[in-house]
Image (cartoon, grey):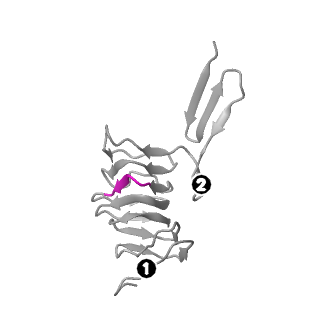
């Protein structure tokens, strides 16, 4: 019979179906164009609602939280260049630890904890931010939801509003 194979590497996956030509996949987020090494994806809620990163991740690909909670178990568990994406239904918890990642993409999830998350830039589609976040680059507001800057968010780059509204709170900056 025919032999089908799937080979997964740090740069994506290759699917071979018998004698047919191979098909290669690499991850690309349509919103931001981020692509490259294999992702670490937290997507299981029912069997493991909370996954704690006690060891350092070795992939340089994106870290995605789709459902359930991904929590830090110590400082600096994620490679500094890896983008972090938090989707609706997903929660990233810094707990009391410090983490540095590449780009932060908030796409409807929750970012919580008391440890500071340091990022290169922020792409905001929506979500809830209660953890302290510091960005060295721009804040880009996307999506149709309104946004008010929380007090625990600082960034040194520009504020770019691509869609939706920026809402100023009384006494805010």
Q: Quadrant of the N terminus?
A: top right
Query: In the rendering, which numbered label is found on residue 167?
Result: 1
Whether residue 162 can be seen here = yes
Indicate the secondary structure of the residue bearing disc 1.
Answer: loop
Where 33 sits versus 132, above or below? above
Whether residue 58 can be seen here = no
- Residue 56 coordinates in the image, percent (x, y): 39, 46
- Residue 166 coordinates in the image, percent (x, y): 47, 78
Residue assigned mark 2 = 30
Indicate the secondary structure of the residue bearing disc 2.
Answer: loop
- Region rendered in magenta: 87-94
- Few, some or many C-alpha atoms within 10 Å of disc 1 (few <14, some 14-19, many ≥20)? few
- Residue 4 coordinates in the image, percent (x, y): 61, 22
Seen at 38% across and 55% down, the residue is: 76
Q: Would residue 90 be counted in the magenta stretch?
A: yes
Seen at 65% across and 37% down, the residue is: 24
Front disc: 2 or 1? 1
What is the number of callouts on the image? Answer: 2
Where 41 sits versus 144, above or below? above
Q: Quadrant of the C terminus?
A: bottom left
Seen at 48% across and 60% down, the residue is: 105
Residue 11 location, quadrant: top right
Residue 25 location, quadrant: top right
């Amino acid at each position: 019979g025919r032999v089908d194979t799937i080979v997964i590497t740090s740069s994506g996956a290759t699917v071979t179906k018998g004698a047919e030509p191979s098909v290669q996949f690499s991850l690309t987020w349509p919103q931001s164009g981020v692509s490259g090494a294999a992702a670490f994806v937290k997507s299981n809620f029912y069997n493991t609602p909370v996954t704690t990163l006690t060891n350092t991740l070795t992939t340089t690909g994106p870290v995605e939280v789709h459902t359930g909670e991904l929590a830090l178990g110590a400082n600096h568990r994620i490679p500094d260049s890896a983008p972090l994406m938090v989707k609706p239904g997903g929660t990233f918890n810094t707990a009391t630890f410090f983490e540095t990642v590449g780009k932060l993409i908030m796409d409807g999830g929750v970012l919580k904890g008391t440890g500071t998350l340091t990022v290169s830039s922020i792409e905001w589609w929506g979500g809830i931010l209660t953890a302290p976040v510091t960005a060295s680059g721009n804040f880009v507001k996307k999506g149709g939801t309104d946004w008010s800057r929380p007090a625990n968010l600082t960034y040194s780059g520009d504020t770019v509003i691509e869609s939706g509204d920026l809402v100023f709170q009384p006494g805010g900056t």
